[in-house]
Amino acid sequence: MPRFAFLGAGNLASAMVDGLLAKGVVAQTDLSCLGGAGRSAPDLAARTGIGLAKSLEELTAKADTLVIAFKPQHLAAADPRLAALTAGKLVISVLAAKRLDRLATTFPAARNLVRAMPNTPSRIGAGMTVWCSRVPLSGADRTAVDALLGALGHALEIDEVLMDTAAVVSSCGPAFLFEFAAALRDGGVAGGLPPAMAQALAVEGVLGAARLLARTGADPEELRRQVTSPNGVTLAGLRRMEARDFRGLMRETVLAAKTRSEEMSRDA
Ligand SMILES: NC(=O)c1ccc[n+]([C@@H]2O[C@H](COP(=O)([O-])OP(=O)(O)OC[C@H]3O[C@@H](n4cnc5c(N)ncnc54)[C@H](OP(=O)(O)O)[C@@H]3O)[C@@H](O)[C@H]2O)c1
């Protein structure tokens, strides 16, 4: 397994380090990190026992794979020495809305570039990451990518042209579901439930439904049909969702987010 070096040591890098160590696929000595002027890198190194690099040279010297995990806005001001320091290495970026062509201007001599988009459930190892690479991955590099992204949960390789839409569904999807859970809770409160009870019921309902969907592999429509009796309670609610064009609203929601993602990728 290659050595991973993390440039940026915040929430996402921490989740990857935690996942890699928990799965036992790498040792602490195979991982190192470097941050900006703040405390995240020394804190991550102290908490997990991974190496703390003092410079970009030290970070990249022993690592075969560099994970770029700072904020997207840091890319424009990235250290120009990165071009030479990443020559011949695998570079994996998790920066939102930074396309492979853009990454190639900062890491022109990398042996390959991977653009990955994880989502927030990655923090608890329940993530879904979509990713693509600049050229097809070698067997060894695929093993490295699988290990790194597998540390966050599930991962799916896709064509870059699908990235904006796929990232909306998998990465914005949790935010849309949080909004749905909040709306379900508020509906319960409107019906007379205490807020804390309504929230607990909404959370467990969403969680159990998602697990059932994943475990059965059934279409959502099929599971919905199974709980909908003719002229029953669920049907009364679903009819109201249909009358207010809930599906049309979700389609517009996804397409609006996709348009914004494309704009941000173009501006990058
Ligand atoms: N969090 C998620 O669930 C999630 C999901 C998908 C994608 N992402 C992507 O992951 C990336 C990181 O997100 P995050 O939530 O982990 O951010 P974060 O917690 O704010 O961490 C940002 C990290 O970047 C470091 N940094 C700042 N300036 C730097 C520089 N000039 N050179 C190197 N490192 C620098 C910071 O170090 P200091 O503490 O020293 O300032 C910190 O370690 C973003 O690009 C985001 O688009 C995150």
Image (cartoon, rainbow, N blue to C red):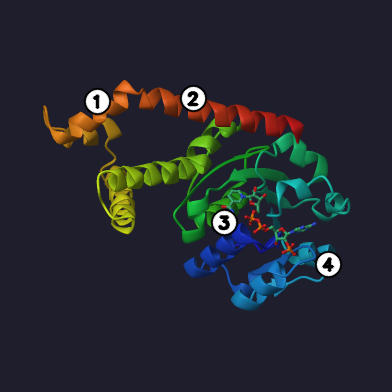
Judged from the image, the secondary structure of the residue bearing numbered disc 4 is loop
From the viewer's side, name the closer residue of 267 and 205: 205
Labels 1 and 2: the sequence-earlier one: 1
Image height of 78 relative to 231, above or below: below
Secondary structure under tag 3 reads helix
Q: How many marks?
A: 4
Q: Residue at x 75, y 46 (%)?
A: 73
Quick one: label 1, few (<14), some, or many (20+) residues within 10 Å?
few
| Rendered-image quarter of ligand 1 | bottom right
| Of callouts 3 and 2, the N-terminal one | 3
The image position of residue 26, as x and y in percent, is 57, 68
Q: Circle 1 is placed at which residue position?
A: 239
Q: CA distance from mark 1 to mark 3?
A: 44 Å
How far apart are the alpha carbons under marks 1 and 4?
60 Å
Residue that badge 4 annotates: 55
User: Residue at point 75% right, 36% down?
Assistant: 268
Position of residue 115 relative to residue 68, above or below, is above
Q: Which residue is mark 2?
A: 252
